[in-house]
Amino acid sequence: MRNSQIIQQKILNLPQLQKQINRWRFQKKTIAFTNGCFDILHQGHIASLSQAAAEADYLVVGLNADESVARLKGKNRPVNDQQSRAILLASLIMVDIVVIFEEDTPLELIHFILPDVLVKGGDYKIEEIVGAKEVIANGGRVVINPIVPGFSTSMLIEKIHKL
């Protein structure tokens, strides 16, 4: 399929997301969830998203809204606005849905979705991951994917500033 409308159709609001989750649950499909700012997409993001997608039938990506990114990363971030970041994520084959959230953490979104698998990239401990205890209490599991060394948005921004 080469229809560019498919990309936009993968970016959902909460009511649309609820309908899709209900369809998948009715079909007995499993849902993985991961989240992040995804400000400048790089190899580390692709690896993490690919690994997350392998954990379930479908992958939902929670994307921090612009205001949330600024609070978390500083006043000069994000580099790319939330619509641009959402379109890039939605264009990836391994991503089934992108949903933008305003809060600093995806806890409300995790409560809303209650994924079968919560995936986080990095060197976290399960007890440090937002939403982990809720997912586990609901019968789900938490997966921590290792980060790809040498790739981070902050490092890319620093490199660009030095040019």
Image (cartoon, rainbow, N blue to C red):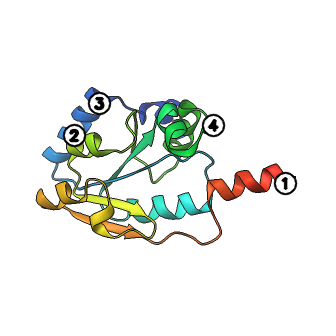
Q: Nearer the viewer, mark 3 or mark 1?
A: 1
Q: Could you say whether the residue bearing mark 2 is in a helix, strand or loop?
A: helix
Q: Is residue 53 left or right of residue 111?
A: right
Q: Amino acid at mark 4?
A: Asn
Neighbours of disc 1 within 10 Å: few (<14), some (14-19), many (20+): few
Disc 1 from disc 2: Cα separation: 42 Å
Residue that badge 3 annotates: 14
Q: At 61% from the left edge and 39% from the top edge, which residue is drawn?
A: 77
Q: At 13% from the left edge and 44% from the top edge, which residue is drawn?
A: 26
Q: Looking at the image, tell me whether mark 3 or mark 4 is earlier in sequence order.
A: 3
Disc 2 from disc 3: Cα separation: 9 Å
Q: Amino acid at mark 2?
A: Phe
Q: Could you say whether the residue bearing mark 1 is in a helix, strand or loop?
A: helix
| Res 98 → quadrant | top left
Neighbours of disc 2 within 10 Å: few (<14), some (14-19), many (20+): few
Q: At 26% from the left edge and 40% from the top edge, which residue is drawn?
A: 108
Disc 3 from disc 4: Cα separation: 22 Å
Residue closer to the observer: 159 or 82 = 159
Q: Which mark is residue 80?
A: 4
* Residue 92 percent coordinates (x, y): 52, 49
Disc 4 from disc 2: Cα separation: 27 Å
Is there CB contact under 8 Å for labels 2 and 3?
yes
Q: Amino acid at mark 1?
A: Lys
Look at the picture and state if 77 lies above or below 133. Answer: above
Q: Could you say whether the residue bearing mark 4 is in a helix, strand or loop?
A: loop
Q: Looking at the image, tell me whether mark 1 or mark 2 is earlier in sequence order.
A: 2
Q: At 68% from the left edge and 59% from the top edge, which residue is drawn?
A: 155
| Res 153 → quadrant | bottom right
Residue that badge 2 annotates: 112
Residue that badge 1 annotates: 162
